[in-house]
């Protein structure tokens, strides 16, 4: 299987993770999540939301996703 890598640049730091790693550690999974949140916040702000609104929306989304995961586990 070919590895799919995403790299997010924040200032001078690069965070890179493989998106399709079935053996990902918790730290790698958290990095993936942070990369996704970073991209989502930037997109939401570019579409007109304030940073605070975007962060609140993502927080609600995270809570819903965690609740759904627990209910279906």
Image (spheres, rainbow, N blue to C red):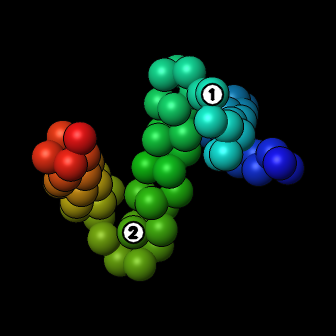
Q: Which image quarter holds the C terminus?
A: top left
Q: Would you place residue 43 above or below residue 67 in this image?
A: below
Q: Would you place residue 12 above or below residue 37 in this image?
A: above
Where is residue 60 shown, x and y percent of the image?
A: 17, 54
Query: Label 2: few (<14), some or many (≥20) within 10 Å?
Result: some
Decide: marks 2, 1 in contact (CB < 8 A)? no
Q: Circle 1 is placed at which residue position?
A: 23
Q: Quadrant of residue 12?
A: top right
The residue located at (45%, 60%) in the rendering is 40
**Disc ID at residue 33:** none
The residue located at (55%, 40%) in the rendering is 32
Where is residue 38 shown, x and y percent of the image?
A: 49, 49
**Disc ID at residue 44:** 2
Residue 16 visible, this orientation: yes
Where is residue 17 shown, x and y percent of the image?
A: 68, 36
The residue located at (56%, 21%) in the rendering is 25
Circle nearer the viewer, 2 or 1: 1
Q: Would you place residue 15 above or below residue 53 in this image?
A: above
């Amino acid at each position: 299987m070919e590895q799919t890598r995403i790299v997010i640049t924040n200032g001078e730091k690069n965070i890179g993770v493989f998106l399709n790693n079935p053996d990902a550690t918790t730290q790698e999974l958290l990095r993936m999540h942070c990369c996704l949140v970073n991209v989502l916040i930037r997109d939401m702000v570019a579409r007109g939301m304030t940073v605070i609104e975007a962060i609140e929306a993502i927080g609600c989304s995270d809570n819903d996703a965690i609740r759904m995961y627990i209910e279906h586990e």
